[in-house]
Image (cartoon, rainbow, N blue to C red):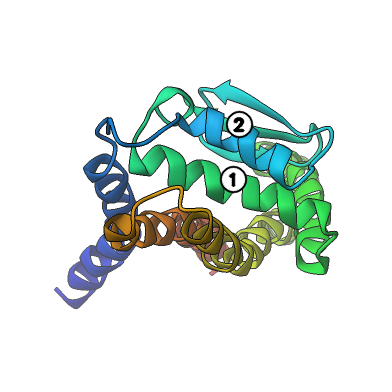
Amino acid sequence: MLIALAAILLLGAILLPQVWVRHVFARHAHERADIPGTGGELARHLIERFKLDGVSVEQTEQGDHYDPAEKAVRLSSDNYAGRSLTAVAVAAHEVSHALQDAYGERSFRVWQQLASLARVTDRMAGVFFIAAPFLAILARTPLALVALIGAGIALLSVRVIVTLVSLPLEFDASFSKALPILRQGSYVADNDMPAVRSILRAAAFTYLAASLMSLVNLARWVRMLR
């Protein structure tokens, strides 16, 4: 009974942040005639305003993000073409990541290096978990399986570290950069600032949900060693 209750609470802790983020975005995604431009237009304006030479703005189906390798702010179709509070707030948030990159902020550089490493270790971990049972049979010893799974868990741990390291970056992008930009530039009305703050908070907490999912995936593989 207690195990079942703990499992339900854990599932709720994982799913609720994701549900809340989607709810906040959808709540403020309706078109507004009083917003002078789309999210894509605001992103381009901010890139020009802050002289972020070489940074482009693109529409994507892969979710809103900033790609430091390609120097591209990528926005989902709704946020790229939409005139909503969600569109302008998310656009400002992603441009703020471009600012972190342009300013050479140390935390962004560390995250970038870890993210590059995580892409490699993710692929390696996938190979390990697929090959581990076959290699263990060939080695004819349970210790070989334990060693292989342990190596895979170590590789998977890099992704957990990356998602956790990203959290301070997300809050900095939302509240130290995007919020002041939107307020001081009068890009949204004063009475809309509480809603904008909620959207930016949701944008930052998107990565909290990712961190929780990474930790759960890691826990599954740890249990294999018990």
Most foreground residue, 219 or 70:
70
Q: How many marks?
A: 2
In the image: residue 35, left or right of residue 165? left
| Residue with the mark numbered 2 | 74
Q: Secondary structure at mark 1?
A: helix
Q: Is residue 202 visible?
A: yes
Which labelled disc corresponds to residue 36?
A: none
Most foreground residue, 190 or 200:
190
Which amino acid type is marked by label 1? Glu
Which amino acid type is marked by label 2? Arg
Q: Is residue 158 above or below residue 65?
A: below
Q: Residue furthest left?
A: 1
Image coords of residue 19 (percent x, y): 27, 50
Q: Is residue 144 visible?
A: no
Q: Are marks 1 and 2 in contact (CB under 8 Å)?
A: yes
| Residue with the mark numbered 1 | 94
In the image: residue 56, left or right of residue 15? right
Q: Residue furthest bottom?
A: 2
Mark 1: few, some, or many residues within 10 Å (few <14, many ≥20)?
many
Q: Residue at x 56, y 22 (%)?
A: 59
Q: Residue at x 42, y 37 (%)?
A: 87
In the image: residue 218, left or right of residue 196? right
Of the numbered discs 1 and 2, the one sitting upstream in the chain is 2
Disc 1/disc 2 C-alpha distance (Å): 8 Å
Mark 2: few, some, or many residues within 10 Å (few <14, many ≥20)?
many
Q: Secondary structure at mark 2?
A: strand
Most foreground residue, 115 or 200:
200
